[in-house]
Image: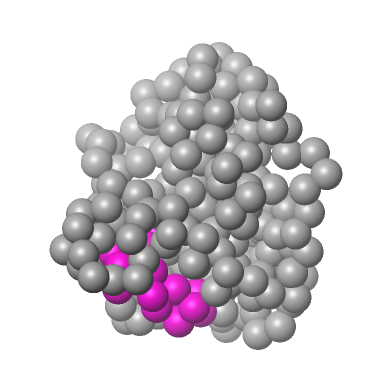
Amino acid sequence: MWTGEGVDRTRKQGGLMIPNPIGLKKRMREGQQILGASLSADTDSDRIRAVVDSGPYDFISVDSQHSALSEKRLLSFCGLCNNLGVFVQFRIKHTRNAYLIGNYLDLGPCGVEVPQTELDETVVESLKSFYFPPEGGRSFGGRARRGAADHLDPVAYGAWWNTYGILWMQIESIEAVTRAHILAKPGVDCLSFGPTDLMFSLKGHPNHHLKTVDDCVAYVARSLEGTGVSVCHRIGSSENRQKFVDMGVTVLLESASI
């Protein structure tokens, strides 16, 4: 059984926008193996803790793209996770909502995933909304922000957040896959895969040299070597961990098993 022990794919640090990252962001940049679990925002505190301990998992992913999720529910869920010291990665509703990333983060997530990313403009908008000045243009506010109680000065908070928060861009088409090295702009921490939508895209390009989702995952992992940008794949079951580690995937996201 894969445990993640002893896995450390150290990467070069060139060309990255944010120096001296901390916590999970630092581990991700170094190419260490990261393991996450998907949970509903309706999950209570006891189950969150049980799931995190069962992995053990480094983060919890919560989704609004394909799930009903109100801002109040997200606020409550992130509050529970904050009390437990659990990192929350949040997938926003739609690609075109990238301009709202700062507003979502004010509700308590530690990171954001932007679905169906294909265009440079989406990445640029996401970076602007995710990071505080001077790296970005996020507005300061929101009492529920992760780390707000520990960093009361706005400038100090912005500097801390920029080294802590994690930004994923999700690639779900063959066009995005072949442009992964361009979409992985400085400030992007991870490119994540949407395997089902990518499968549809592949069926629409039967003559492409990349034939399967696995081909695409391996291609992107190779293209990002040495960049400090990680690759995430939704692997379903823990039984698939080693297969994707061998492909160069360093962030694994699976369904909670308990």
Image coords of residue 23 (percent x, y): 73, 53
Specify whether residue 134 is in view: yes
Going by the picture, which residue comes out furthest to the left? 204
Q: Residue at x 38, y 75 (%)?
A: 178
Specify whether residue 137 is in view: no
Image coords of residue 12 (percent x, y): 75, 75
> Residue 248, relative to residue 21: is it above or below?
above
Q: Residue at x 83, y 44 (%)?
A: 6
Image coords of residue 41 (percent x, y): 38, 30
Image coords of residue 155 (percent x, y): 64, 72
181 falls in the magenta region: yes
Q: Nearer the viewer, residue 125 or 29?
A: 29
Please identify the quarter of the rendering in which residue 179 is found: bottom left
Q: Residue at x 80, y 39 (%)?
A: 5
Please identify the quarter of the rendering in which residue 36 is found: top right
Tell me: 126 left or right of 17.
left
Q: Nearer the viewer, residue 28 or 70?
A: 28
Q: Nearer the viewer, residue 80 or 256?
A: 256
Tell me: 25 left or right of 95.
right
Q: Which residues are magenta?
A: 170-185
Going by the picture, which residue comes out furthest to the right? 6
Q: Residue at x 34, y 49 (%)?
A: 195
Query: In the rendered image, which quarter contains the N terminus?
Result: top right
How many numbered discs, if any? Answer: 0
- Name the colouring of the figure: one colour
128 falls in the magenta region: no
Tell me: 29 left or right of 106.
right
> Residue 15, relative to residue 131: is it above or below?
below
Tell me: 170 left or right of 22.
left
Please identify the quarter of the rendering in which residue 25 is found: bottom right
> Residue 185, relative to residue 25: is it above or below?
below
